[in-house]
Amino acid sequence: MNIYTNCSLLHYNTFGIQVRADMLVEYESVGELKQALALYHERMGEKPLLHIGGGSNLLFLCDFKGMVLHSLVEGYKVVGEEGDDVLVRVGAGMTFDDFVSESLWRGWYGLENLSGIPGQVGASAVQNVGAYGTEVGSLIEKVEGVSLSDGSQHSWKGAECGYAYRQSIFKQELAGQYAITYVTYRLHRTFRPQLEYGGVRQAMAEAGFSEDTLTAMKLRQVILFIRRQKLPDPAVQGNAGSFFMNPVVSKREFDSLCRRFPGIPGYRQGEDAFKVPAAWLIEQCGWKGRRWNDSPAAVHDRQPLVLVNKGGARGTEILHLCEDIQTDVKKKFGIELRHEVNIVAPEGDLDDIDDD
């Protein structure tokens, strides 16, 4: 277990926001996590407690006046096989994309369309990460965690986790209550490519890959290529990936939008709903590539879903940019944009700033 006081969090958040924490504790096992929680309740019980993964979905507004927990629980193990399926239990501190790569090398398929998503395995179960037609919740068999309040251990079957678009019980009723320690994925020994998402087949053709000879590793290469074309590297330009969620509106609302804005894109969600690309809405409001008040906080010039730190931006500047975009989209389209990134507010709480 590693304990740091007055610790910089610059390298613990991909936005590259320079803030500090009163204490940072890194743990490598469930036992060490329980020791860290005992330390917190003994020394810092009145201060906030925050558990982070790879920091790829966080925006810090100021220094964190409390304890930050960071998982280093890694490794994976096959815990069951059922016909074509293989159940793999993975440490929550393992880098998610490292496990995606390893799973494909092992001949365990299902995660290939999620290649390149930043963060740790534990965060994948909290956020229900998704990309290119796949959501990780559909592949999660079991989630294990430790209560931050009393150190007790709990587990949830995948069906109990309330997975929906970018949602889970760990973001809703159980938000901030548990540290995820292990995630068990149900993967497959047969490769079943998911190619319906826009752009995948075109990128395959450009790479010279045919559907008849496609392998999971080739599909991973295609997905990584698409992501590199659209998304900035956090090591070069601070960002947290997609900042906003794509809004879902009723069919009636979408029909009204189509009359007012011919050509507005939408993707059917069930019988009476459509998902509208937030990137399109933001671009139509003129925000693509723009800075906020000439600050280092800006909208990416190729992917409007991504807010970037061009160097030295404060978290509050990124937040103001977010709010101005939400205001303009609401004014033009009547649609509420919700941020996907967790805002760590001055009180140390994850603050749903757009719910007011």
Image (cartoon, helix red, strand yellow):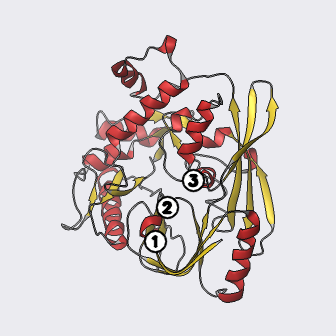
Residue 212 locus on image (x, y percent):
51, 11
Q: Amino acid at mark 2?
A: Gly
Residue at left offset 45%, top offset 78%: 20
Q: CA distance from mark 2 to mark 1?
A: 9 Å
Q: Is residue 110 above or below residue 144?
A: above
Question: The residue tagged with tag 3: helix, strand or loop?
Answer: loop
The amino acid type of the residue labelled 1 equals Leu
Please identify the quadrant where the N terminus is shown: bottom right
The answer to the question of whether label 2 and label 3 lie on touching residues, with beta carbons closer than 8 A, is: no
Q: Earlier in the sequence, mark 2 or mark 1?
A: 1
Q: Quadrant of residue 179?
A: bottom right
Residue 94 vs residue 308: left or right? right
Residue farthest along the top direction in this orientation? 212
Query: Which mark lies nearer to you, 2 or 1?
Result: 1
Image vertical order of residue 198 relative to residue 296, above or below: above
Mark 2 or 3, nearer chain start? 2
Kindly identify the residue that appears in the image at 57 percent across and 34 percent down: 270
State the residue in front, 239 or 345: 239
Q: Residue at x 29, y 52 (%)?
A: 332
Residue at x 63%, y 29% (from the top left corner): 109
Question: Would residue 39 be found to the left or right of residue 270 on screen?
Answer: right
What's the residue type where badge 3 is placed? Gln
Query: Which residue has dot 1 on it?
Result: 9
* Mark 1 and mark 3: Cα distance apart in space: 17 Å
Q: Would you call the spot at circle 3 few (<14 residues within 10 Å), some (14-19), or many (20 or more)?
A: many
Res 11 visible:
yes
> Mark 2 near mark 1, Cβ–Cβ under 8 Å?
yes
Report x, y in % for residue 3.
60, 77
Which residue lies under the disc numbered 3? Answer: 120
The residue labelled by disc 2 is 55
The foreground one among 275 and 104 is 104
